[in-house]
Image: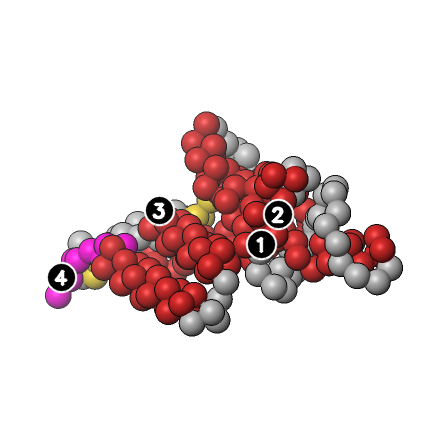
Amino acid sequence: MDIRFQVDSASVLGPALVLFAAVTVVRVRRAVWDRRRGLLRLAAAVYAAAVLSLTVFPLNVTWGEYANQAPWIGQINFVPLLTADITMVPNVIMTVPAGFLLPLLFRNATSASRATLMTAAASLSVEAAQLLSYIVLNNGRSVDVNDLLANTLGGLAGYALVALALRVPALRGTLLAAALPRSAALRDDRRRTATADGSREVPTAGPVLRP
């Protein structure tokens, strides 16, 4: 039996994004979510969908006579930097937004090392999904440790950018207004302002996140 078909990203991620956008609109209108925080969540969802569309989709399902017969272990490059070249740059760029968004979304991204580890974990999950799609669907994707390194570097660069942006008064207020209530950026800002006057929270200058 020969089975061959393709699952495009639009057929899976498109409806998911539309549904999430609808939920966001409803929650914002009902004042469950603040408008800026709703937009931040929606931007993060769009970004995640874009990454998945580039790294996991389309899913080329091939079973039967024309399926890829090469062993899965041969699809993995375990040696870092051996084949490193200019093609790593897009992988770095791809995860810069992740490093930028992490402190605004999650409470654990309180330092460069933590944000970098979170980006590395997300990148490792993508590589694992690519390998699984090769094993189960004969999808033809390879797994490269250089992609993991490049993605991690991009996350670190994104974290550096958001830490820098939070030092700029014109950007600081907007970013903190959009940050989720339990995010690292807001929690650290509240701690700093409380420490500054000992009792109440007031705006303070300077970096919010630890390098």
Q: Which numbered disc flags the more N-terminal residue, 3 or 1?
A: 3
Look at discs 4 and 2 and give the one toward the viewer.
2
Q: In this picture, which residue range is highlighted in magenta?
A: 1-9
Q: Residues within 10 Å of mark 3 (few under 14, many from 20)?
A: few
Q: Which residue in the protein does label 3 denote?
A: 54
Label 2 with label 1: CB-CB less than 8 Å: yes
Q: Which mark is residue 2?
A: 4
Q: Which mark is residue 173?
A: 2
Q: Quadrant of the C terminus?
A: top right
Its colouring scheme is secondary structure
Q: Nearer the viewer, residue 47 or 39?
A: 39
- Tag 3, which secondary structure? helix
- Could you tell me which residue is drawn at 50 percent across and 62 percent down? 34
Q: Which numbered disc flags the more N-terminal residue, 1 or 4?
A: 4
- Alpha carbons under labels 1 and 4: distance apart: 54 Å
- Alpha carbons under labels 4 and 2: distance apart: 58 Å
Q: Is residue 162 visible?
A: yes
Q: Which numbered disc flags the more N-terminal residue, 4 or 3?
A: 4
- Could you tell me which residue is drawn at 42 percent across and 57 percent down? 42
Q: Quadrant of residue 80?
A: top right
Q: Residue 89 location in percent, x, y? A: 47, 32
